Image: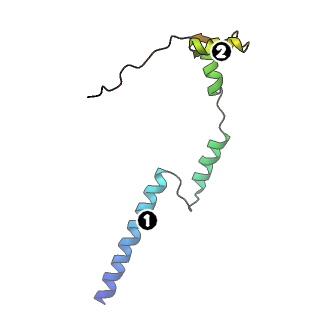
Amino acid sequence: IRDRVSTQSTWGNKISGFTTHLMKRIARGPVRGISLKLQEEEKEKKMDYSPEVSQVDQQIADGIEVDDDTLEMLKQMDMGSLSHLKKTPVTFNNNFPKRK
């Protein structure tokens, strides 16, 4: 009898431990092979979401920064008169590590 009780207790601990582990994984995000109604609803919300203003339109409205070479290239392609172009100076990164 003692052996059966200890074996059942061990299985109970393993089951409760695995259940706890699984619940933590579900709380972090979707778990492969398990489909919960709440997870499906969240997935549908993400798929159906469309922002008021797209990221591309927002960047155009804020202005597109281009350097001199890019602006010259756009002018050669007859695109130099595009609105929202901002000319920015070219900066070089001189913070490279020095060799010993």
In depth, the one of 73 and 66 nearer the eye is: 73
Residue depicted at x 30% and y 87% = 3
In depth, the one of 87 and 35 nearer the eye is: 87
Tag 2: amino acid: Met
| Residue 75 sits in quarter | top right
In the displayed structure, would residue 91 be above or below residue 16?
above
Is there a contact, CB below 8 Å, between mark 2 and mark 1?
no
Report the Cα–Cα distance between label 2 and label 1. Answer: 61 Å
Rendering coords of residue 54 (x, y %): 65, 27
- Label 2: which residue? 73
Q: Is residue 99 left or right of residue 91?
A: left
Count of numbered badges drawn on the protein = 2
- Label 1: which residue? 19
Rendering coords of residue 23 (x, y %): 45, 59
Residue depicted at x 46% and y 56% = 25
In the displayed structure, would residue 18 be above or below residue 90?
below
Rendering coords of residue 48 (x, y %): 67, 41
| Mark 2 or 1, nearer chain start | 1
Residue depicted at x 36% and y 81% = 8
In depth, the one of 14 and 99 nearer the eye is: 99
Q: Which SS class for mark 2?
A: helix
| Residue 51 sits in quarter | top right
| Residue 77 sits in quarter | top right
Instruction: Pick the quarter of the image with the C terminus.
Output: top left
Instruction: Pick the quarter of the image with the N terminus.
Output: bottom left
